[in-house]
Image (cartoon, rainbow, N blue to C red):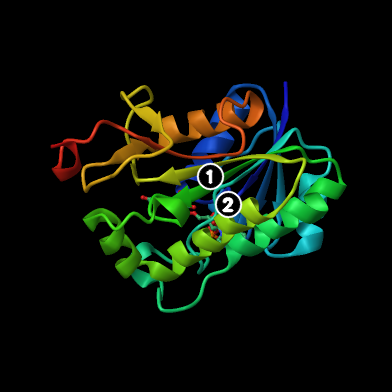
Amino acid sequence: MARLAVLGATGRTGQEIVRRAIEAGHDVTALVRRPEALPVRDALLTVVVGDARDKDTIRSIAQGQDAVIASLGRPESGRTKDEIDDSQPVDVCEVSTRHLLTVGSSVGLRRIVLMSTHGAGSSNDGSPYVVKLRDMVGNRVFDKDRMEQQLLDTDTEIAWTVIRNPYIYEGPLGTPHAVHEKIVLDETSRITYADLATFAIGEALQPQHPNTFLTITEPLTGSAAR
Ligand SMILES: NC(=O)c1ccc[n+]([C@@H]2O[C@H](COP(=O)([O-])OP(=O)(O)OC[C@H]3O[C@@H](n4cnc5c(N)ncnc54)[C@H](OP(=O)(O)O)[C@@H]3O)[C@@H](O)[C@H]2O)c1
């Protein structure tokens, strides 16, 4: 069984990753700002309270892990989607990734899986879907842009995979989906938390797509499919 750290473990995807990794018998270390927001309790789970932008926190979390999965997003802890002030700059993905690549590397970390957003980096393709997304939650996407650019700019022994998510929803495991290195999305693109979490754990522990940016989505039925 493996040792896996999850950043953003109180998030919707993060919780799903924690639960499924424990079910699979892995030792999980969860980084959280609000321990009360992670309802999972298990002998295989260690909860660490801290901020993912803190270098020493990332050093201690990364130490001894087979892989780290970062599922970091909403900037304001404890707020719902509608309560978050999206006019504020966001840097959690950029800063935590910088620490993973530097101090993580120095403590022997060799594998990271990072959640991003379809529309960041080279997937900023000018499609109506991406234009609307960057208009709505630009500061969060700009953070992902900078996170992704750092990976391209850094010569590292850490193998990384970036998952650029479409809309994520509550649904069953095993809903038909596919992995794409290049795809134009539309408003019908989506993936379940269950499928995304399962894919991320698999990619972390048995990498099929090292040093790759990819998008995982169910089949499109909207404008991009025509
Ligand atoms: N949900 C979607 O439809 C969607 C669509 C496209 C892309 N994405 C991306 O996919 C990933 C997963 O999405 P999600 O909806 O599951 O995320 P989420 O529910 O917004 O969870 C984000 C997590 O990041 C944590 N976090 C943020 N800043 C932090 C910091 N400085 N230190 C420690 N933890 C911090 C949050 O902690 P708190 O609980 O304390 O706030 C939370 O656990 C994210 O990268 C998101 O941007 C999501």
Q: Is residue 89 left or right of residue 130?
A: right
Q: Mark 1 CB in 8 Å range of ligand 1?
A: yes
Whether residue 52 is visible: no
Q: Residue sitting at 63 percent across and 23 percent down?
A: 206
Is there CB contact under 8 Å for labels 1 and 2?
yes
* Quadrant in the picture for residue 138: bottom left
Q: Residue at x 70, y 53 (%)?
A: 154
Q: Is 181 or 104 nearer to us in this picture?
A: 181
Estimate the spatial distance between the alpha carbons at disc 1 and disc 2, rounded to whole Å.
6 Å
Q: Position of residue 3 (x, y in %)?
A: 74, 31
**Is residue 174 visible in this depiction of the protein?**
yes
Upstream in the sequence, badge 1 or badge 2?
2
As rendered, which of 213 and 204 lies closer to the eye? Answer: 213
What residue does disc 2 label?
A: 8
Q: Is residue 184 left or right of residue 85?
A: left
User: Mark 2, residues whose alpha carbon is within 10 Å: few (<14), some, or many (≥20)?
Assistant: many
x, y percent for residue 155: 74, 49
Q: Is residue 65 above or below residue 9?
A: above
Q: Secondary structure at mark 2?
A: loop
Estimate the x, y position of residue 53 in percent, counting from the top left: 68, 64
Q: Which mark is residue 25?
A: none
**Residue 27: x percent and y percent?**
72, 31
Answer few, some or many: residues within 10 Å of disc 1's Cα (few below 14, many 20 plus, some between 14 and 19): many
From the image, tell me which residue sits under label 1: 14
Is ligand 1 within 8 Å of the beta carbon of the residue shown at mark 2?
yes
Of residue 168 and residue 171, the one placed in the foreground of this image is 168
Q: Amino acid at mark 1?
A: Gly
Tell me the quadrant of the picture where the C terminus can be found.
top left
Residue ID at (39%, 63%)? 80
For the point 50% across and 69% down, which residue is it? Answer: 76
Amino acid at circle 2? Gly
